[in-house]
Image (tube, helix red, strand yellow):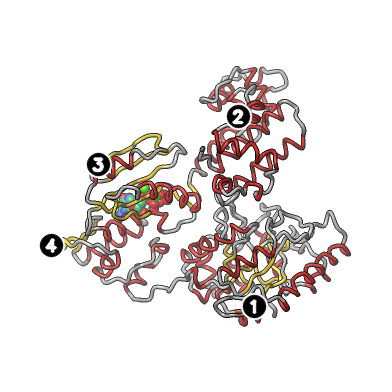
Amino acid sequence: MSQLTNKEISEILRRVATALEIKQGNRFRITAFQKAADNIEKNPVELVALWQKDRLREVAGVGESIAKNLDQLFKTGYSKDFDRITKSVPGAVFFLTTIPGIGPKTAYRLSSELKIKSPDKAIKKLFLAGKNKKIRKIPGFGEKKEQKILDDIKAWKQKQKESQRMTLYEADQLAGKVINYLEKLPTVLEAKPLGSLRRRNDTIGDIDIAIKTKQPQEVIDHFTSFPETKKVLVKGQKGSSRILLTNQKQVDLRIVPPGKMGSMMQHFTGSKAHNITLRELALKKNLSLSEHGIKNLNTKKAFSFNKEQAFYHFLDLDWIPPEIRENQGEIEAAQNKNLPKLINLKDIKGDLHVHSNFPIESSHDSGQDSSRRILSWAIRNHYQYLAFTEHNPSKSKHNEKEIIALIKRKKKWIEPINYSNTNYKNSRTNKLLFIFNSLEIDINPSGKLALPKEAFNYLDFAIAGIHSQFNLSQDAMTKRIIRGLSHPKIKIWAHPTGRMIGKRPSIEANWDQIFLFCKNNNKTLEINASPGRLDLPDFLIRQAINQKIKLAINTDSHNLSQLELMSYGVYQARRGWAQKGDIINTWPLDKIKKFLLS
Ligand code: DGT
Ligand code: CA
Ligand code: CA
C-alpha cells in the first residue's frame, strides 16, 4: 500500500493534465484532471483514508476513471494509465510549468530547444539560459518574452519562500504522524507538541515536540529513524535533535527526564517574545528561567517543575493559555489576575455558514452533501441551530424571476424540516434543531448585493462576502463593504479579509471605519474556521472585540468533513482573546433568533 498525500496525488493529476495538453488531448479531459487536482488538494481529509473506506467518489471531480487509477496508485504506488500518458514528456517540463506564466506548451518548447530534460535544477537552468540571453534566440521568443520568463521565475522564488510555512491543519496532521510513531516506543512516557503548534498559530514554521523519558538515547535513535526522514540535522546534542523530512519540513525534538516536563513545556512553547518578557520579570525577582526550571540567583537553589501551572505560579502569575503567549499584554494580565476566560469548543451551539447541495444554481462552488446528512451530523454534535448559506444563484444563468423562484423553493424546502420533523432533535435539550434559511451573497465591486430585492423577503437573514476583485483601493474597498453590509437582512460578514493563507493577501480596507460601522449597525464579523483562511486574523479579532463588536465562528463547510473543523476557528478566536460572550453562536437559540431575525 502507498501512503500518498493529497498534495502528491494532485501533483500527479496535474502532470497528467500537462502531458495531455502537450499532446493536444481532449479539452474536457484536461479540465477534468485539473479540477480533480484542485479539489483533492483542498480536501481536508486525506484521500488515502477515504480510499480505505471505499469513499473516493465522494470527492468532487473524482469520477469513475480517476477513482480506478487512484485505487491502483494506492495499492501499487503507480498507475498504468497515468504512466502511459506522462512518460514521453521530459521530467523538466513538469517543473517548468510550476512557474505561473509558463504553460505546458511553452515549457515543452523551452525544454526541447534548450535541452533541459532532467527535473534536477530545471528551473535554475532555465533562469541561467535567460541570463545568458539564450531564450531570446528561440524562434518566436525574443527579448521581451525572455525578460518576462526571468521576472516570472523571480516572482515564483519569492512566493516559494513565503509559502514554506505549513497551515495549522497540515502541521497537526504531520505532528500527529510523528507523535504516533514516537509513542510506539514504550520508553516514551509522554509526547507533547509545543512551539507555534501548541500556541495554535495560523501558520507553522517547524514542528516542536517534547518527550518525557528515562531512556534518552533510545528515543533519539528511534526519532532519527522516522521513515520519512531525508536528513538528520542534529542528533542528541544536550537532548535536542532535529530532522528534515522528505516533504522539506523540519521537526525539533527535546528530551526531558521525568519531573521537569513543566519547565520544558513552558520554555519550548514560547513564543520567544513571551519568554523574553517573562525572563526579564523573573530577573527582577532574582530568578533565572530555563527549560530545566527556575534558579534563585541569591541562594543558588534550583527548582524543578513537572507541571507548567506550578512554573507560572512560582512567578506569582496565573497560568496563561498557550494561544495568547505572544507578549501582547498577557503577562501583565496574569500578574493582575485578570486574564480573559477564553472561549472553548464546547461553548459553540451552532454553525451559521454551511453549504448544502440544495440545487440553487449558485454563482460559486456548491456544497457536496445533502441537508439530511448535515443535519444528522449537527444533531450528533449537539448543535441547537444551523444556517444553510448556499451561494446566491448565478445572475449570468438566471433572470430575476427565476432567481426569486429558486429562493422561494429553498424556503419551502426548509420550513417543513423546522416545524414538522421530529428527526432532528437535540438529545440533550430534547428540542428540535432550528434551521435558519439563509444565503451567502456576493458583494459586487460597487457594493451592490448580488440578489434581487424581492428575494430577500424569503430569507431569515443573510451573510455577505467578497468573492471577486480583491484588489480595489482602500477607499473603494471600504465603501464597497459598508454599502454591502448596509442591507438590514445582512447580519454576518463572511471571511472579512479575503486572505487565503500563503496564497492570497488580505484586502486593503479602513478597518477602523468598518468596525465603527459594524458596531453602530449590529453587524457581526465572521471568524472563518477553514484552516486555509482563518479569517479574521487574530490581531483583527482582538481589535474588533476591543470595540465591542460581536463575532461568529463558522466553518463555511462545503462537505460533511469540514463541519469538524470548527475547532480551528475556536483556536483562532482564542488567539484574538475572544471570550464566550463575544461569539454569537455560543448564544442559546432564543437569543440568536432574536438577533438574526430582527
Ligand atoms: P515557528 O516554528 O516559526 O512556527 O515558531 P515557533 O514559536 O515554534 O519557534 P521555534 O520553533 O523557533 O521555537 C520554539 C520555541 O522555543 C519558541 O516559541 C520559544 C523557544 N525558543 C526558541 N529559541 C528561543 C530563544 O532564542 N529564546 C527564547 N527565550 N526562547 C526560544
Ligand atoms: Ca516551531
Ligand atoms: Ca523549532
Residue highlighted by disc 4: 301
Q: Residue at x 24, y 43 (%)?
A: 217
Residue highlighted by disc 2: 96
Q: Is residue 339 visible?
A: yes
Mark 3 or mark 4, whichever is nearer to me: 3
Q: Where in the figure is residue 297, as x and y percent of width and height?
A: 15, 61
State the mark number for residue 369.
Answer: none
Residue type at mark 1: give it. Answer: Leu
> Reading the chain from its start, which is encountered first: label 2 or label 4?
2
In depth, the one of 509 and 430 nearer the eye is: 430
Q: Judging from the image, what secondary structure is the residue with disc 2 in?
A: helix
Q: Give the spatial CA distance, label 2 vs label 1.
A: 56 Å
Pick the quarter of the image with the C terminus.
bottom right
Determine whether 192 is above or below 106 in the image.
below
Question: Which class describes the residues within 10 Å of circle 4: few (<14), some (14-19), or many (20+)?
Answer: few
Q: Where in the figure is residue 168, as x and y percent of width and height?
A: 48, 53
Residue highlighted by disc 1: 432
- Report if the CB atoms under discs 3 and 2 are less than 8 Å apart: no
Q: To which quarter of the image does residue 143 belong?
A: top right
In depth, the one of 61 and 185 nearer the eye is: 185
> Reading the chain from its start, which is encountered first: label 1 or label 3?
3
Q: Where in the figure is residue 61, as x and y percent of width and height?
A: 69, 45
Q: Judging from the image, what secondary structure is the residue with disc 4 in?
A: loop
Is 35 positioned to the left or the right of 52 in the image? right
> Reading the chain from its start, which is encountered first: label 3 or label 4?
3
Determine whether 247 is above or below 176 in the image.
above
> Reading the chain from its start, which is encountered first: label 2 or label 1?
2
Q: Give the spatial CA distance, label 3 vs label 2.
A: 40 Å
Q: Judging from the image, what secondary structure is the residue with disc 3 in?
A: strand
